[in-house]
Image (cartoon, rainbow, N blue to C red):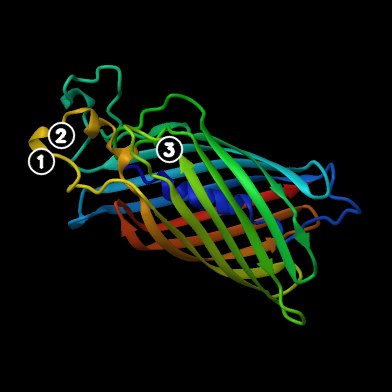
Amino acid sequence: MPVTSASFLLLVATLFAAPVLGAEAHDSRAGHGEVGLTLQYISVDGFEGSLGNVPLGEVQTQVVNIDVDYHLTDRLTLVAGIPFVRERYLGPFDHDPLALDPPRTDVPNVDLGDWNTDFQDFHLGVRYLLKESPQLIIEPFAVAGIPSNDYPFFGHAAIGRNRAQLDIGSSFIYRPPISDAWYRLDLSYVFVEKTLGVSINHLNAHAEAGYFFSRRLSGRLFVLYRDGSGLDFPVDFPPPAERTDEMWYQHDRLVRHNFTNAGAGVDWLLNDRYRLSTSVFTMLRAVQIHDVEYAISVSLSRSF
């Protein structure tokens, strides 16, 4: 089961981090924006199925994500990004396409211990600044995820699910008066392209509490939550001797990947244009997903 749903959520959270720590001030936002580069490492040490944790081995994921925000007007922002993913599986239970019935001779085995590398999905969308005041920002958004190529999706080290999706929601940021703290909530619902008639639509929530130690330095604690529909492994799949059919080939696209992640981050406004952000998280709740031991992210962004 690929872990990329977790990494995608953290990258999406990075895409919407700009309103709290603004960079260079302008009379108008129109024509300005921000470009960011994020490096992320994720370590997985098992799979959490319906019968408990299964020690399947280790999955290592490295992500390089490029994203751009461009303020088309003072209120309307265009967002775009794409992650480049390197992933490998170290364990005895590889997903061999040649073991399927019929054998998939056109599908590579990505679980042989080598690094599997490819671009994942384009992220293209818009944000609209519905309300902006010293205390409250409300910014609805809609972001589409579109596979950049026909990458393999069968295997522990798969780059992703290779399915289109649409993420619709809103960001809420509150800064209490006479306080250096802020609170943030991103809520969205994700519509995912169905596979074999099965829906894996889900709710995403990103809650954050932060504090400005100075004008340039802040810290934050955050929780990432996902809950949605889909199948369960192994109860919704045949016994091991029969896991060779089309349903098994598509199982990474059918299983619900629900989780709760918790972590902390630090943001430095290096100067009027550059911002450096770091974060680390671990998985507190894993349901039908690779169990993330820890994840580390470092981002550098530049306003223009």
Q: Amino acid at mark 1?
A: Pro
Tell me the CA gap for discs 1 and 3.
Answer: 31 Å
**Residue 190 on image: x %, y %:** 49, 46
Q: Earlier in the sequence, mark 1 or mark 3?
A: 3
**Residue 133 on image: x %, y %:** 80, 67
Contact between labelled residues 1 and 2, with CB atoms less than 8 Å apart = yes
Q: Residues within 10 Å of mark 3 (few under 14, many from 20)?
A: many
Near-viewer residue (234 or 299): 234
Where does label 1 land, which residue? Answer: 239
- The residue sitting at 59% across, 64% down in the picture is 185
Q: Amino acid at mark 2?
A: Arg
Q: Quadrant of residue 172?
A: bottom right
Contact between labelled residues 3 and 2, with CB atoms less than 8 Å apart = no
Q: Amino acid at mark 3?
A: Arg
Where does label 2 land, which residue? Answer: 243
Tell me the CA gap for discs 2 and 3.
Answer: 27 Å
Residue 298 falls left or right of residue 70: left
Q: Residues within 10 Å of mark 1 (few under 14, many from 20)?
A: few
**Residue 184 on image: x %, y %:** 62, 66
Q: Quadrant of residue 292?
A: bottom left
Tell me the CA gap for discs 2 and 1.
Answer: 7 Å
Disc marking residue 178: none
The mark closer to the camera, 2 or 3, is: 2
- The residue sitting at 25% across, 17% down in the picture is 105
Residue 85 falls left or right of residue 237: right
As helix, strand or loop, the secondary structure at mark 2 comes to loop
Where does label 3 land, which residue? Answer: 86
Q: Residues within 10 Å of mark 2 (few under 14, many from 20)?
A: some
